[in-house]
Every structure is written in C-alpha cells, then in structure tokens.
Amino acid sequence: MLIVQKFGGSSVADVGRIYNVADRIATAYREGHEVVVVVSAQGDTTDDLIAKAHEITDRPSRREMDMLLATGEQQSVALTTMALQSRGLPAISLTGWQAGVATSSAHTVARVKKVNPQRILNELEKNNIVVVAGFQGYSPSDDVTTLGRGGSDTTAVALAAALSAQLCEIYTDVEGVFTADPRIVKSARKLDEISYDEMLELASLGAKVLHSRSVELAKKYNVNLVVRSSLTSAPGTYVKEVGSVENVMVSGIALDKNVARVTIVGVKDEPGIAFRVFSLLSKRSISVDIIIQSVGSAHTKDIMFTVDRAVHREVLDILEENKRHIMYEHIVSDDGVCKLSIVGAGMVSTPGVATLMFEALSDSNVNIDAISTSEVKISVLLDEKDADKAANAVHDAFIDTNMRFKG
Ligand code: ASP
Ligand code: MG
C-alpha cells in the first residue's frame, strides 16, 4: 500500500534521530509499501531562523520570511535522504514546489489549494522513497510560501489525499493525542481514538500535536490518520469520523500560550465599527480569536480581541495607522495572556460542564479574564503565569467526575 509518514522537528533533531527515522522508513519500504515521507525542520531550526530575521529587522517582510523559513525543511529532506541512501535504500528529496504543493499567496499562513502529485508518482514508479519538505509550497506567482507554524502535518495530509494513500502516519515525540499536554499535565492520558471534529477543536485551540488545517483536510478527504511516537512502537491515536468514536462529555483540554490580547478603548457606539476593525485585519490575513465588546461610558464602548503573538506588533501598527478611520481613544495590549479550553462533542447536552471548569479555576485561585463558548468547547483567557496551574486543576476536575475523559 501507499503510506505517507511525517516526522516532526524533534524526530529529526540530530544525526541519531535521523538514522532512527531512516530505519522506520526502511521497515515500511522493505515490507513492500510505497513510502512518501514528509519532514519538518530539525529541532529548533525554525525558531532560530525567526530569531535571525529579527536580528536584522523588527518587521521582516512576509515573503522574505517564507524564503528564509523554507530552508529549514530543505536541510531536513536532504539529510534524511542521505541517511536512507547510506542504508542502501533508493530515495530522493523534493522541495514543496517540486512535489507540486500549490498554495494561496498568503505568505507565512498560506493554504494548500491543490497538489499536483505527478513528480512524486514518477519517483514512486522508479521505486524511490520520496522525501518531501513539509510546511512549504508555491504561490500563484511562483513564490515560496509556508503554511503557518506546525504546517508540515498539513503537507502530509494534503499529499495523502492527493495520492489516495491508505494511511497517513504523523510521527512525533509523544505517544499520540493526550487529554492534555503531558509535558504540563502529569495526569494526562493518551486517547486511543478521537473524532475529526474534536481533534479539529483541540488543534485550533492550541493543542500543538496536529496543525488544525491538517485535520480539516483529513476530515474532508477522509484520510486515515494516526498520530504516534517515532521513539516507541506504541499504537498511537487514530483520528476518525464521528460515530466510530465513543461519545464522551469532555475529550481533552488545550492550552495556548501563544496569545496576545488587544483592547480598543473608547470607540463610538454606532453601527459599522466592528466591521471597520476586523476587515482591516482580515485583509492582511490576520485571524482573530475571542472577541468581546463591552459597554463603556458616554456612548462609547471597548472592543477586546485576541490574536497570535506573532502578529501582535503588526496588529498594533495597523490600528495605529488607521486611528482616524476607526476613531478610538487608545489601545491597551498585553502579550502575557494564555487561553485554556475544554473540548468535547458531548458537552452541549450536558449541564454543569462550565460550572465544573469555573469551580476548578476558582478553587485554585485563578482569575478569568474573558470567556468564550461554542457547542463543543469552552475557552477562558488567563494570565500566563497561571497557565500550568490552571491546566492541571481543570484537567483533574474532569478526570475525577462522571464527565470523565475517555482513555
Ligand atoms: N518547521 C515548521 C515549524 O516549526 C513547520 C513544522 O514543524 O511543521 O513550525
Ligand atoms: Mg507539529
């Protein structure tokens, strides 16, 4: 069968790890499978490249960021392919462009539009293991693009869909999807399976185990997806269609520490203000998360919203440039906040879920900044210093009740 195997940055962090990955790939290949491999940049490479850019300028252009960041994955594919070749296996590396990954033109947050897999198919035909650079593609104007942090997962799922792969394996440094990040919450449990929808919520709320767009694509194209460890042979977590997954109240919690909060103080209380603000941001491909509008005094109001920390500066610049157009008194912003969320498909029909969450936070003396809810999740905004304490308290509160996690 045709298998796509994706290895994250920690799985290829050094020479030993690269050989470990090569051995895994070799096993699948020797079992007679066609293997397409996707790798991320080694270890902290992407962070280091971002830091390098910021040594040059505070505001690097997004196009040049993509040009820079794409080099991380190119190192990994070349090194992984060399390791495979030195084990006597036929292998070839491809960039995102060579692999036919066509994306939108939104630099640093591009979306995969289409994959033209012809080159990959030709290489498989020649019995090659094909090692593709994750996280990158090319835009309609043939510029290098990247898919957003963690985007190699999306490359893997997009390739699996385009190649009609029987299986897409996402290898990482944990044994699968957990009820919470096991590095922060000691009592977190591994899930054997999770529905696409719950996984999508967890991923978009900041559980870093899968890139949320990868889950969206997996659901859309019904890709057989499993998250497992590159270091052990544990079976991992299967991500599946609902219905084939046991229904529970709360399936997991996500903690997102990459949040900045912006408040526009003193805007006029009249129609069109929110539209003015958020259309300015969406034109620059900036996505906004929790939005709260509060009544101020004397015909004014405040609009509070959260964004990724990476675009915090840009947002402040946009608001400053458009101060006359929006008409506000001043801006208050804070990048020391985090977002804690609980997710579960069964939540909507269960009274008391929110109360239990708030009780756990209150018992551990954590102040809630803002709350946002939907049918399948409750998110709260907190001071970053309370993040780990709050995650543990909320997680343990649900573990100990009949709203327990499956596990
Ligand atoms: N190297 C990129 C990042 O660190 C993409 C990835 O790891 O999936 O975000
Ligand atoms: Mg990742």
Image (cartoon, rainbow, N blue to C red):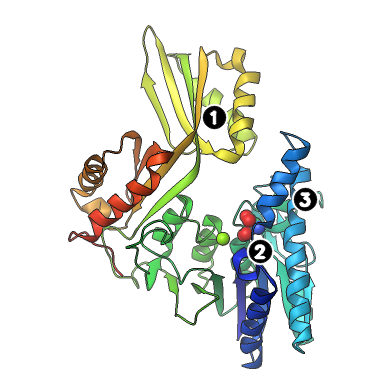
What type is the residue that disc 3 sits on? Leu
Label 1, label 3: how many angstroms apart (C-alpha)?
A: 29 Å
Q: Position of residue 92 (x, y in %)?
A: 79, 77
Q: Where ligand 1 lies, by image quadrant? A: bottom right
The residue identified by callout 1 is 278
User: In which quadrant of the rendered view does residue 54 lie?
Assistant: top right
At 60% across and 86% down in the image, what residue appears?
1
At 77% across and 63% down in the image, what residue appears?
74
Q: Residues within 10 Å of mark 3 (few under 14, many from 20)?
A: some
Q: Position of residue 116 (x, y in %)?
A: 73, 67
Nearer the N terminus, badge 2 or badge 3?
Answer: 2
Disc number placed over residue 68 in the picture, else none: 3
Compare residues 67 and 373 and report the one nearer the observer: 67
Q: Residue furthest bottom?
A: 31
At 42% across and 54% down in the image, what residue appears?
201
Q: Position of residue 274 (x, y in %)?
A: 49, 24
> Horizontally, is 158 left or right of 236 in the view?
right
Q: Is mark 2 within 8 Å of ligand 1?
A: yes
The residue identified by callout 2 is 40
Marks 3 and 1: in contact by CB < 8 Å? no
Helix, strand or loop at label 1? It is helix
What type is the residue that disc 1 sits on? Phe
Helix, strand or loop at label 3? It is helix
